[in-house]
Amino acid sequence: MFTIREIIEATGGKLTRGPARASVRGVSIDSRTVRKGDLFIAIKGDTFDGHDFVRDVVGKGIRVVLVAKPAAVKNKNAAVIRVADTIRALGHLACFHRMRFKIPVIAVTGSAGKTTTKEMIAAVLRRKYTVLKNEGTQNNHIGVPMTLLKLKKSHQVAVLECATNQPGDIPWLAQVVRPDIAVFTNVGGSHLEGLKDTHGVLREKWQMTSFMPRRAKVVINADDPLLAAHCAREKKLNVITYAVGAKARFQAKDIGVVRGCRLRLVLEGKTIELRSCGRNNAYNALAAFACGRLLGVVPRAAAKALSAFCFPKGRQEFIRWGRGWLIDDSYNANPVSMACAIETLSVLRTPGKKILVAADMLELGTKSAAYHRNAGKMAARLGVDVIITVGPLSRNIARGAVAVRPDMPVFSYNDACGARTKLREIRANGDAVLVKGSRRMKMEEIVRSLLKG
């Protein structure tokens, strides 16, 4: 995969000991799973420091290690390469590898819907190509480079979700990925502790284009006002639009809910029925359809791929629950995705009550209380019947709902245990229950508990 000379060239490192003539067949940052023949990169994380395990991996037969501080390696046959920052070195090595391949690389970013959009794009492109994509949410400064390092000659296209929670994340990922097509889902209130406001989010996200060639393709949601306004001034890139309301190159028509829980839409004359009734998923499907068409997937094949698409676990995953539904949207939450989820619950056809189980949305900065209250107001206006909140911030969701409908049943708890008990008490067969909250709130535990009965 790499010679020592290539590793040094890519990372700017220095060989401090060991033979200069060697090669590696893979890259690992985990001492538990590293395989003989791999390059081991010592990454310092929140819990562990890979430098503490260098001696162990060399003992397992690893002959090339990349470090940022002195390593006690006694084996004369082991090569030690020193760099200033091993995380940056990982990115530079991934970029070096990415540039070996003359294939389309698509980067997906935005405030909400990134993972579902990435998965939909991959599903559409698989109708014609062999696709590499990040698994799960390996979408940060570690996961994206590690995904790129999996590129093989058999891959014909790569689809990479790229996320941020502080200024500088996206510019770095853009430098590593060098996308040929950049997809923007939306811009809204997310990670505001670091990015301050939605304009800060837009500035950060748009940095994904900073290492793209002139006239490269940028695929945007034209219904998003911030994206639309920004792109109206964009002259250097080839902007491809998709939309439900605004005029766009790829526009959904005849949108409606069918069979109680499916969203139907028509694209280029082909009918698509998504396995979710959330209108936000029309945008995810539009982005995927657009990428497919740009890379030569015919409309019929793209439509079939989207109609067959199964939503990722914890992202508006519809689970039949007796005569009703459990909507598992527990993976994460911010104001944009919370609004989408509430709208999905509101349009779902079910014989019973519509119950929102909502936990805190984190990292929203000084406007956190207002964002939570707005979510509650929206739920009340759209006809949600009962709200159960988990955590101190989400009590503002309850307050917002009661401000709109004073008689609305709301129940607030500090942890998931009380919420589970109340839900079991009030839930009837035929009810639809939406579970949503930020990642650290662990709302998936409520879902698992409910499904166990």
Image (cartoon, helix red, strand yellow):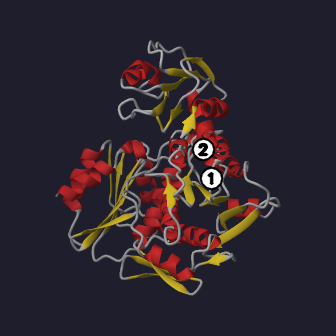
Instruction: Report crowding for label 1: few under 14, some 14 to 19, many 20 or more residues within 10 A (C-alpha).
Output: some
Residue 431 can be seen, yes or no: no
Amino acid bearing label 1: Phe
- Locate residue 243 relative to residue 33 in the image: left or right: right
Name the residue located 74 percent from the left edge and 60 percent from the top edge: 216
Front residue of 439/47: it is 47
Residue 97 got which mark? 2
Instruction: Report crowding for label 2: few under 14, some 14 to 19, many 20 or more residues within 10 A (C-alpha).
Output: many
Instruction: Say if 37 sits above or below 76 in the image.
Output: below
Name the residue located 55 percent from the left edge and 21 percent from the top edge: 19
Location of residue 236 by image quarter: bottom right
- The percent coordinates of residue 369 (x first, y second) are 51, 46
Instruction: Say if 386 sits above or below 446 in the image.
Output: below
Q: CA distance from mark 1 to mark 2?
A: 8 Å
Instruction: Say if 401 sits above or below 277 in the image.
Output: above
- The percent coordinates of residue 390 (x first, y second) are 35, 47
Which quadrant does the C terminus fall into? bottom left
Q: Secondary structure at mark 2?
A: helix
Residue matched to label 1: 101
Q: Look at the numbered discs 1 and 2 and tell me whether their residues touch, using CB distance below 8 Å.
A: yes
Front residue of 104/196: it is 104
